[in-house]
Image (cartoon, rainbow, N blue to C red):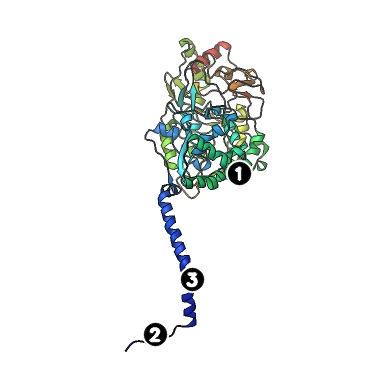
Amino acid sequence: MRRQEPPVTAVQQEARRRRWRRLPLSLLVLAVVVAGVLALAIGLPTLWRYSGESVRHYADPETHFLHGSIGSEVSGLPVRLWRVLPSLFPDVFDGGHYEVFGFLYAPGDEASRGDLPIGVGTREVRGVDLAWFNCALCHVGTVRETPDAPARQISGMPSNNLDLHGFISFLLENADDPRLAPDSVLAAMDEQGQELGWIERRVWRHAVLPRVREGLLGTRAMLAPLLAEQPPWGPGRVDTFNPYKLIQFDMDVAMLDESERIGTSDFPAVFLQRPRQGMDLHWDGNNASLQERNLSAAIGAGVTEESVDHPAIERVADWLLDLAPPPSPYRPDADGVAAGKRLYMRHCADCHGYQDGDRYVFDGERLGQVVPNEGLGVDPARLDSYTETLRRDQLTLFADDERYRFRHFRKTNGYANLPLDGLWLRAPYLHNGAVPTLHDLLLPPEQRPQAFVRGLDVLDEEKGGFVAPDCTPGEPLEEGFCIDTSEPGNGRQGHAYGTELTPQERSALLDYLLTF
């Protein structure tokens, strides 16, 4: 017997009518989905690149030091933007590239074909190649024995060329310049031959470039008030900790005591780190842990707790353990060297170790220890810039990771007695670079140059250090930067050791120091 179908209710009839009415819309949605799948198939490589992260690894440790990523790129700029900035701002770059700010290029690299400077690492983050600072930025410099000689790049010496203040100021001052608007940047990329696909172009226009400008404006709001209060750092120098306070710990200048707002000091050398384990590190000796010193420096370069690449930082640190400075090219009078060594061993070796032929001896009763500035008498600004408040804030970093949590930072009352290996490459002298040559360092402070040119790399054959002619602050120079030691933080006073010697004794001591 045939089963009788139940009667169709009014509700079921209305539902069937709605389904039929929706059929054209469903077919349209299906068509859109199919079209979308086809579009994705065409543009999939581009879209795939906008997810995930990748980084280039270098087999050679020195190449890794020069070009590798440490995780700072999240604080930096897209590689594509690095490549077009010189053409967008020809008035600043004067027809050149980043060498206008003292950046260096590795032998064989060419900025004109898109190569980035030494000290700038790259990493793809969420599909965008970003570039920012690594350790080599501050720790590779150049030397010329004569004005006509080619510049010799030396890894581990202080960067005597880099005008970091000038570069950062350029970025911040132009954060809202129309030349950084998407239309302008994309046109510059097109002119340079940087190809962008249809999808990629819209990602850059509506996401990447607006985010870059937003980041620069935010950084300007934090840093510009501080930089406005400080004398320009000049090449080879940086304010180590004040930008750290503002960027890492959300302070503003109004929260800083006036005594701590200037902390400008020279980039240090980073040769032979193994013998320095356990010494008081940084200019003020505020940490005796190489690992914490290195990680703190990486944070200063733009690394965050989330982006840090610990293996990359540790690989550089391992390489630096035994990186020796090249021997001094000076060949002073042998009798003078012998007489100078006797004076040095009597007056200086306990604090700084000593040079024995081509070998530096890391031995001294007070080597690597902090000397109270009450007796040392040098400019106190860098010492005062590191505060107890900053120390407490630093101890909160990496708090959830026992391997990297900061434990050893401390507030000191002076400056550390540093080893002097590679002394011939470290000019200008004192922690703030306020004394141009070794000859000048042995003079009474009032006889040291009040204003001189720094940022040059030609060796001074007689005085030790780099050629540093006198200058008049405010007057233009063909090259270099006129440092005025009367400016806050730039004082040339203190460290009067050796100033009481006779001229003959000072000459002999200088002969010995030239061998370091």
- Choose the circle earlier in sequence order: 2 or 1: 2
Q: Which numbered disc, 3 or 1, marks the residue closer to the eye? A: 3
Give the labeled residue for mark 3. 21
Residue closest to the eye, 308 or 169? 169
- Choose the circle earlier in sequence order: 3 or 1: 3
User: The N terminus appears in which quarter of the rendering?
Assistant: bottom left
The amino acid at mark 1 is Gly
* Label 2, label 1: how far apart the Cα atoms are: 71 Å
Give the labeled residue for mark 2. 5
Q: Dot 3: few (<14), some (14–19), or many (≥20) neighbours within 10 Å? A: few
Residue closest to the eye, 440 or 226? 226
Q: Dot 1: few (<14), some (14–19), or many (≥20) neighbours within 10 Å? A: some
* SS at mark 2 in the image: loop
Q: Is residue 25 above or below residue 464?
A: below
The amino acid at mark 3 is Arg
Give the labeled residue for mark 1. 218
Q: Position of residue 407 (x, y in %)?
A: 51, 43
Q: Which mark is residue 314?
A: none
Name the residue: 62% across, 17% down.
Answer: 470
* Label 3, label 1: how far apart the Cα atoms are: 53 Å
Q: Position of residue 218 (x, y in %)?
A: 60, 44
